[in-house]
Amino acid sequence: MSDKIKLLQGDITKIAAEAIVNAANSSLLGGGGVDGAIHRAGGKTILAECQAIRDRQGGCNEGDAVITGAGNLPARYVIHTVGPVWHGGQNGEPAVLRSAYHRCFDLTDQYAIKTLSFPNISTGIYRFPKKLAAQIAVEVILERTSADIEAVNIVCFEPENYAIYRDLLDKL
Ligand code: AR6
């Protein structure tokens, strides 16, 4: 499956994929980092759909994910997931990050999505250690990239994350 995993560097809002994963927060109301970039580039329909989800279920828990349309983005869907805030690692943060990736794949399967792009969830404002986050991401991506999925893009914004993933993927 590893030939389907593509490592890219750049702005996830500029890369076409059927679904773009957003590193959101539990409010689903937007924020900084990649979340801000996705809402800015995607336009207000994404926020309106997030509001509707909030009205229905009251936001999104850490380690869970929800799906909306993608507005003006070069995509059909945005999968909004909420990674853990890093508090030192003794509070179940790795399991929550693993769950966030899994829930994105649950929605990918449910919506028969063939190409999706992940940012490096939790490694910015939420301060999750980058190497451990990359190990968890690669493990889940390898496990969950089924025959029906054509490509999974790992989109790194920072050179440091790109180098960490390059190293991990080269060892596969
Ligand atoms: N394209 C791809 N990756 C990006 C982009 C972009 N345009 N912009 C930033 N990144 P962060 P988190 C990278 O902070 O740590 C928000 O306020 C960034 O370099 O976006 O999960 C939410 O609303 C980093 O590697 O998300 C939440 O409150 C990665 O995306 C909170 O931040 C994740 O960094 C979530 O924090």
Image: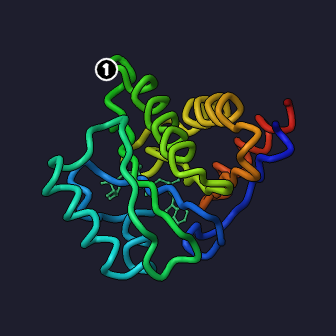
52 in relation to 140, above or below: below
| Depth check, front residue: 130 or 29 | 29
Rendering quarter of residue 44: bottom left
In the image, what residue occupies the spot 39% across and 29% down? 96
Residue 137: % across, % down? 60, 36
In the image, what residue occupies the spot 45% across and 25% down? 94
86 in relation to 111, above or below: above
Q: Is mark 1 within 8 Å of ligand 1?
A: no
Amino acid on which disc 1 is placed:
Asn
Q: In the rendered view, does 52 fall on the left or right side of 44?
A: left
Residue 66: % across, % down? 36, 50
Rendering quarter of residue 11: bottom right
Quarter of the figure that contains the C terminus: top right
Residue position marked by numbered label 1 in the rendering:
91
Quarter of the figure that contains the N terminus: top right
Residue 50: % across, % down? 27, 63
Q: In the rendered view, does 12 fall on the left or right side of 24?
A: right
Residue most extreme to the top: 90
Quadrant of the picture in which ligand 1 is shown: bottom left
Rendering quarter of residue 10: bottom right
Residue 37: % across, % down? 43, 72
| Depth check, front residue: 7 or 76 | 76
82 in relation to 102, above or below: below
In the structure shown, which secondary structural element does the residue marked by tag 1 occupy?
A: loop
